[in-house]
Image: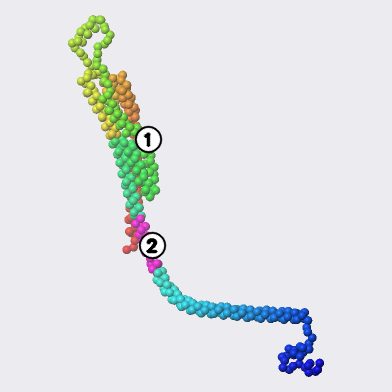
Amino acid sequence: MSQDDLTPDPAAPTGVPSATSRANRPPTSPRSSGGTLALALLLALIAIVGVGYVAWRQWKLTHISTVALRTTTGLEDRVNTMEHALSGATNQDTLLMQRLNDADQVNRSLREELLSQDQRVRDLEEAVGRLSEKTLSGQDAMRLDETESLLRMGAERYTLFHDAQSAAQAYALADQALAGVSDGAFNGVRQSIDAEREALVKSQSADRQQLLDTVVQLRNDLPGLPLKPLDEPTTNQDNGVWARIRRALYSVIQIHRDNGAPVDIADARIAREMVALDLAQAQAALIAWDDDACSAALKRVDAGLVAQFDPQSLAVQQARDHIATLGNQLKPSIPVKLGGALSELRNLRAVHALKSEPDNGAAPSGKKP
């Protein structure tokens, strides 16, 4: 091999063996060719990974820059919005300061008006207080008048009609009326009213309506009560001389006892009417609350039943029992002395009237002209 053969071809690219050198190079083994190929592939793979990594970093930086740009743009927009908002807030603060100044002036005027209104309200409260005092005094006077009228009516009712129940009701109403009086000086009068009312309640007799019902029932039963039987000759036959003379005269002359109870059929109507009249008088006396007259009428009724009616009859006996029961229920009770509470009330009212007159006379003199 000559020197020319070993000289590389100048036209050949650098790093590439010439054809002559390749021809003269001994043939490489397949193992060395595979290692070189693998190395080349590895280097190519490393280069691709490096290029991909660089491209990824470049893309990420570009993305980060884009996001940062967007964020910066958003922040600039927000800053601009905040600047506008601050400008508006400044304007609003200025308006608010103006309004606060105006409100301060209004509040000062309102305060002055409130002070004047407060004085007016105080004057009005004083006037209302004086008016309420006058109203209360007028109401107390009205209640005292009502109490006095009720006490007087209750006493007159008991005096005229002996109606203890109605008088007790009048006293109860008087106590209720006096309870509405604001002055505590009349509490003693209330105690006196309660004492007299309790005495009236204790003095009440039986139920007046029950007594009236009993008398009405007696009047209804009276037509059915049997009278005493007519006089008849005695059944015992006496054969003496006087007995034969009496029997002989009996066929010619008949003598009836006028006050001996037996009556004939013609006088039965009169006997019943007399007893019925006494029962009517008893009923009228009960309605008029006249217990004495009722007791006297019932006694006459009982005497009429004994004299004119059959005492052996069960109906007559029951009627007499009812009359006796009525008489026991109408026993005279201890009279109640009324008028103490009324006198005490009038005395207290007179004392209060005397106390109020100097006060009313001294009030105008204390005022300056």
Can the viewer see residue 307? Answer: no
Can the viewer see residue 280? Answer: yes
Name the side, left or right, on which 308 lies relative to 107. left
What span is in magenta? 112-132
Q: Which mark is residue 70?
A: none
> Could you say which is closer to the camera, residue 265 or residue 102?
265
Q: Which residue is mark 2?
A: 122
Q: Is residue 343 magenta?
A: no
> Could you say which is closer to the camera, residue 178 or residue 62?
62
Q: Toward which corner of the image does residue 14 lie, by quadrant?
A: bottom right
Q: Which residue is mark 1?
A: 202
Q: Toward which corner of the image does residue 209 lie, by quadrant?
A: top left
Asked if residue 278 is positioned above or below residue 45 in the image, the reply reads above
Please rate how many residues cluster around mark 1, counting C-alpha atoms within 10 Å: few if below 14, some from 14 to 19, many from 20: some
Q: Secondary structure at mark 1?
A: helix
Q: Is residue 116 magenta?
A: yes
